[in-house]
Image (cartoon, helix red, strand yellow):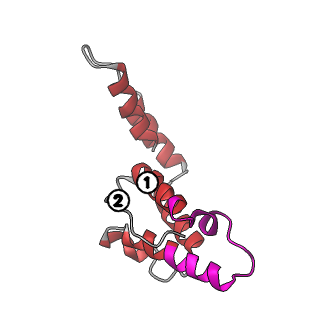
Amino acid sequence: MAASAPNFQLPRLNGQNLLAWEVKLHMVLMQQDLWEIVNNPPACFTNEDVKKNQCALSTKTLCLEDSQLSLVRKLESAQRCWKALLAARVRNTVSSQVTLMRQLYPMWLEAGESVTNHLDKMVHLFS
């Protein structure tokens, strides 16, 4: 586990930037050797596992906007925190699918618009 903090600034999850936040935080947790405790925690924690869990949990919590803290304030597991944050943002209901389709159908490649820019807009809808 790395002892020093990263020398770059992570985005704070604000409800609109899940994809960027998820990818960047995942990379930081991997860099600090904390991802395994989030992704696949052991059934019985050793002292080292407890420290890794606390470090991963605090790293995640510090990367949240204040408005998101209510989602995780009582959670003590880094894995549960991760799942709660993702579950709060990923909606797989008929209503959300209809909304997505309504946003997707009118998206046409505008004259003069680059294909890359157009695809980025579409990817943003699905993230």
Camera-nearest residue between 60 and 89: 60
Kind of element beneath mark 1 = helix
Indicate which disc residue 10 carries.
2
Amino acid tagged 2: Leu
Camera-nearest residue between 117 and 26: 26
Q: Position of residue 107 (x, y in %)?
A: 36, 26
Side of 55 where 35 appears, left or right: right
Side of 82 where 106 appears, left or right: left
Kind of element beneath mark 2 = loop
Q: Position of residue 106 (x, y in %)?
A: 36, 26
Camera-nearest residue between 49 and 60: 49
Residue extent of the magenta highlight: 31-55
Identify the residue at image location x=37%, y=61%.
Answer: 13
Q: Is residue 18 in view from this perspective? A: yes
* Residues under numbered marks 2 and 1 in contact, where contact means CB atoms less than 8 Å apart: yes
- Disc 1 target residue: 24
How dense is the environment of label 2, judged by Cα within 10 Å: few (below 14), some, or many (20 and up)?
some
Q: Quadrant of residue 8?
A: bottom left
**Which circle's residue, 2 or 1, is located before the other in the chain?**
2
Total labels: the figure holds 2
| Quadrant of image for the N terminus | bottom right
**Which secondary structure is most common in the magenta stretch?**
helix
Q: Position of residue 25 (x, y in %)?
A: 45, 59
The furthest residue to the top: 111
Side of 103 where 2 appears, left or right: right
Relative to 71, say whether 89 is above or below.
above
Amino acid tagged 1: Lys
Identify the residue at image location x=31%, y=73%.
Answer: 66
